[in-house]
Image: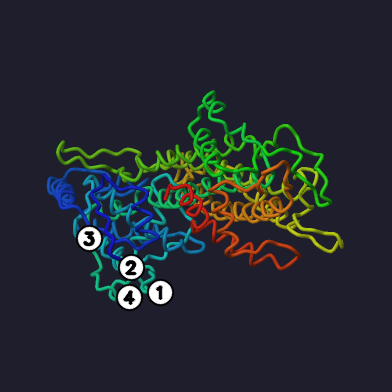
Amino acid sequence: MSQSIHLDGHSLTREDVVAVARDGALVDLDVDAIVAVRRAAAFVEQIVAEDRTAYGINTGFGRNAGIRLKDDEAARQLQRNLIITHAACVGDPLPTEVVRAMMVLRINTLLQGHSGIRPSTLQALTAMLNRGVHPIIPSLGSVGASGDLAPLSHMAMPLLGEGEAEFEGEVMSGAEAMAAASIPCVELTYKEGLSLNNGTAQITAHATLALADLEHLVEMADLTAAVSLEAKAGRLDAFDPAVHALRPHPGQVATAANIRAFVGGSSLCDIDPQRIVDERGEVAKSISPQDCYSLRCAPAVHGAVRDALGHAGGVIDVELNSVTDNPLLFPEDDRVLSAGNFHGMPLALAMSAVKAAIPVLASISERRIAMLVDTATNDGLPMFLVDNEDGAQSGHMLVQYTAAALVNDLATRSHPATSFNVPTCANTEDQVSMGANEARHVYAMATDLEWVIALEMLVASQALSVRMRRLVRKGVGKTDPGPGVGTAAALAAVREHVDELLVDRDLRGDINVARELVGDGTLLDAAREALGAG
């Protein structure tokens, strides 16, 4: 991988994290940042040499903070014990992309030089990331308060020649992985174990990757809504800029503009109702002067989700370049300060809002599916979007069932983990964030949201194809109505892989392909390219 991300502790972006996590980008460490790291490590040595008592340096941890260490050997043993005893997670291993994100986040925060880790230890962790030594980290065990102690301890285990790691596709012991990658194991000294496992890297990793997916999916939801709008031969008044100037929430304004752009040039929206016919060729009678809320209120609903994501993104942006361990070292002021930067609540509450937003976006998408497959609401389209004169066709009936099941599952998983505090560490940590659970839930829920959006695109594409066949010309010189530039491009991209459903067939392949097209950006890229946005 030729791409390299320069880490200095202050300029890491969400895009950088995604590049390292998903694209295998390498990292290099800023020279000036290493100087700051070395200064903080020397400050730790000074504190020890002067026989000053400083929590986390020459004392025990948590309820053992009042116990003073006797000597260097005790300090080394304590830091090692901190890692191996705190590596107590259970459950399925975290995905490799999450592990890589955790590693780059931890490296970046340590580069600020307020933690006390030695440059050599930090460089060993960096070598692990760059050479693909990925620690095996079980997914459950962080309460997101004194940082993500347990998962970060698992991350540090291979550094000590302990635990397990994946290297070149094979899971092996941490010692074997380090040897295979030609990285010497490390013997920790004062403060280093605490520097490695005290911070919010798991919360931030899950949150960063989930947000990248969700920002894409809210854009996709705008596109699927635009295709549904045209399939319904809907009305554009609800997307008029004048409307949203009177209620200018940023997300609402952006959503309305997106949908307007995607349907730009359409002759389906606001079409003469007399040209909308049913399967018998008769003018549809159910046409209302305004569309259902799942279309008309899409700017408000999608926009609110977009704003929730925007707030979460701002929180993550701060966290990416924050120092989140404890105690914090300030060598220039000769101070060691114990505080609570490790507490995950800023991220946890932001993720709670995103968690609540996911089923909202899924639900409005499912409602558009239900609207399109029902003759009572789809203005002249056939029931379940397939001709059914012989009564033997079910069409897209069960696609809506699946979307409904996904929406219900997302809704039941949206309860905020932050609202249930379970104190830890003999009540020293008496208020915890549960942010790791919150962000992990959001990360998983994004996958199911992708399925719902894909199901809408499948149904909306079918409905739009049927609609264009059922419109009749009226008046001299009238041309066949067609979709907008963006929606036409999206429909064409779907049709390259999924044929219109004329008679019943096994839909599993169609559904899986639709999800791939939604997830990999094919449809959104096609629409944007057609609009000239690239």
- If the image is split into quadrants, where does the N terminus sit? bottom left
Mark 3 residue element: helix
Amino acid on which disc 3 is placed: Gln
Who comes first in sequence, dot 4 or dot 3?
3
Mark 2 residue element: loop
Q: CA distance from mark 4 to mark 1?
A: 13 Å
Viewer-side label of 4, 3:
3
Who comes first in sequence, dot 4 or dot 2?
2
Q: Give the side of residue 472 with respect to residue 306, left or right.
A: right
Q: Which residue is mark 2?
A: 132
Q: Which residue is mark 1?
A: 169
The x, y position of residue 42, in whole percent, is: 14, 50
Residue 171's place in the image compared with 57, above or below, is below
- Asked where in the image residue 323 lies, by quadrant, the reply is top left
Viewer-side label of 4, 2:
2
Q: Give the side of residue 349 with respect to residue 282, left or right.
A: left
Q: CA distance from mark 2 to mark 3?
A: 14 Å
Q: CA distance from mark 4 to mark 3?
A: 19 Å
* Classed neighbour count for the residue bearing mark 2: other residues with Cα under 10 Å, few (<14), some (14–19), many (≥20): many
Q: Residue furthest front?
A: 476
Q: Give the side of residue 379 with respect to residue 204, left or right.
A: right
Amino acid on which disc 1 is placed: Gly
Could you say which disc has been placed on residue 123 in the image?
A: 3
Mark 1 residue element: loop
Who comes first in sequence, dot 1 or dot 2?
2
Q: Which residue is mark 4?
A: 176
* Classed neighbour count for the residue bearing mark 1: other residues with Cα under 10 Å, few (<14), some (14–19), many (≥20): few
The residue at 13%/47% (across/down) is: 46
The residue at 44%/59% (across/down) is: 88
Q: CA distance from mark 1 to mark 2?
A: 9 Å
Q: Residue furthest top?
A: 246
Q: CA distance from mark 1 to mark 3?
A: 23 Å
